[in-house]
Image (cartoon, rainbow, N blue to C red):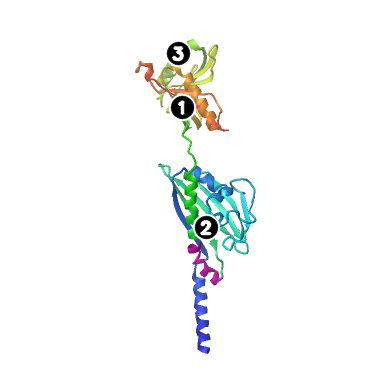
């Protein structure tokens, strides 16, 4: 008996000593692929109420005991607490601590009588529209050797739950109807405009005088650039400070430059500031631009962009080199900011 007790003591020391050598941090991680956009997947994870449709714990107990949702409906601060008699669920709370749209969701999880755990979901959408989801959880087992030894079994205990959850998250997300993107009569996109040095002239003209006035202003600007050794850095443009089909239009004709010096006469040196804009590509005569402007304004309204400055046009096609008006390309810009 004495030898047995000695052996048991030695075994206990070995086990406890071995436990101390184990890492305190336990990480469980599973990955799944979902044929849906990251936006859709994110929306199902960032709303804790939506978890009822796919998480493994609601599958065990659909009417989870003591279930209470507090805080915002989604995002940081959203909290779900429960008090279940189910032996595999128990009592606890989970809260979203941080989230970034279509990128990640972080959670804090506390079980009654245990240390907290930190969970996370990361989303990565491919060009083909397939989203890779990584679901992970980290827990610190503390200094106690037995707790660290117990941590060795966590992956085997919780890993299957994560796999179940990802499989059912996949079913839920892939069943969400996908809205077809709205089509517009011209190509329209949200772009970033870089800072650009310019020479420009401001003037007013009736609708019938615009073409002639623009020609005069571009001529003066090019004469100034030739006299000062300036070089154009792009196609000519016009900023429409005010447009009145039945009256006078306040326009600013300009040419981008690699560098500028002080202007002469009506020519002023200036700068187009960097920022965000909505750009539409108009193809055809300048007299047919009204429909393109309407399409751009509709796009801005649909996507929640607010115009913050006058629109401007870049005349990509040289009318002299390409006399066929049907082939003329004009880039139309509206500087915007989110509403």
| Rendered location of residue 87, percent (x, y) | 58, 63
- What is the total number of numbered labels drawn onto the structure image? 3
> Magenta span has 325?
no
Magenta-drawn stretch, dominant element (helix, strand or loop) = helix
Q: Which residues are magenta?
A: 144-157
Which residue, as the protein is rendered here, is positioned at the far bottom? 2
> Magenta span has 151?
yes
Q: CA distance from mark 1 to mark 3?
A: 28 Å
Considering the image in quadrants, where does the C terminus appear?
Answer: top right
| Vertical placement of residue 295 versus 30, above or below | above
Instruction: Give the residue at mark 1.
Output: 184
Q: CA distance from mark 2 to mark 3?
A: 66 Å
Q: Nearer the viewer, residue 305 or 302?
A: 302
Q: Identify the secondary structure beneath mark 2.
A: strand
| Vertical placement of residue 133 versus 2, above or below | above
Q: Which mark is residue 211?
A: 3
Q: Nearer the viewer, residue 59 or 306?
A: 59
Instruction: Give the residue at mark 2.
Output: 137
Is residue 289 something that shows in the picture? yes
| Rendered location of residue 94, percent (x, y) | 60, 54
Q: Identify the secondary structure beneath mark 3.
A: helix
| Rendered location of residue 6, percent (x, y) | 52, 85
Q: Residue at x 54, y 29 (%)?
A: 301
């Amino acid at each position: 008996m004495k030898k047995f007790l000695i052996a048991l003591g030695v075994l206990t020391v070995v086990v406890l000593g071995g436990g101390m050598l184990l890492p305190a941090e336990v990480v469980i991680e599973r990955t799944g692929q979902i044929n849906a956009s990251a936006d859709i997947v994110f929306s199902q994870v960032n709303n804790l109420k939506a978890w009822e449709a796919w998480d493994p714990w609601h599958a065990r107990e659909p009417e989870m005991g003591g279930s209470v949702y507090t805080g915002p409906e989604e995002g940081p601060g959203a909290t779900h607490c429960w008090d279940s008699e189910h032996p595999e669920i128990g009592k606890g709370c989970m809260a979203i601590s941080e989230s970034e749209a279509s990128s990640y969701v972080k959670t804090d999880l506390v079980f009654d009588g245990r240390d907290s755990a930190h969970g996370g979901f990361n989303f990565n959408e491919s060009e083909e529209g397939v989203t890779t989801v990584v679901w992970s959880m980290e827990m610190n087992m503390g200094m106690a050797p037995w707790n660290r030894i117990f941590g060795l079994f966590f992956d085997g205990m919780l890993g299957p739950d994560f796999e179940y959850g990802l499989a059912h998250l996949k079913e839920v997300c892939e069943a969400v109807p996908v809205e077809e993107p709205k089509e517009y009569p011209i190509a329209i996109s949200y772009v970033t405009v870089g800072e650009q040095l310019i020479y420009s002239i401001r003037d007013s003209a009736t609708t019938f005088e615009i073409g002639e006035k623009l020609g005069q202003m571009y001529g003066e600007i090019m004469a100034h650039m030739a006299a000062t050794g300036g070089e154009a850095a792009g196609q000519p443009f016009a900023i429409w400070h005010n447009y009145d089909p039945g009256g006078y239009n306040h326009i600013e004709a300009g040419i981008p430059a690699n560098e500028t010096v002080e202007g002469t006469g009506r020519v002023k040196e200036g700068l187009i500031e960097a920022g965000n804009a909505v750009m539409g590509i108009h193809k055809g005569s300048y007299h047919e631009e009204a429909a393109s402007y309407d399409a751009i304004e509709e796009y801005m309204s649909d996507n929640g962009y607010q115009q913050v400055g006058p629109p401007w046009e870049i005349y990509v096609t040289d009318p002299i080199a390409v006399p066929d008006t049907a082939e003329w390309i004009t880039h139309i810009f509206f500087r915007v900011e989110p509403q």
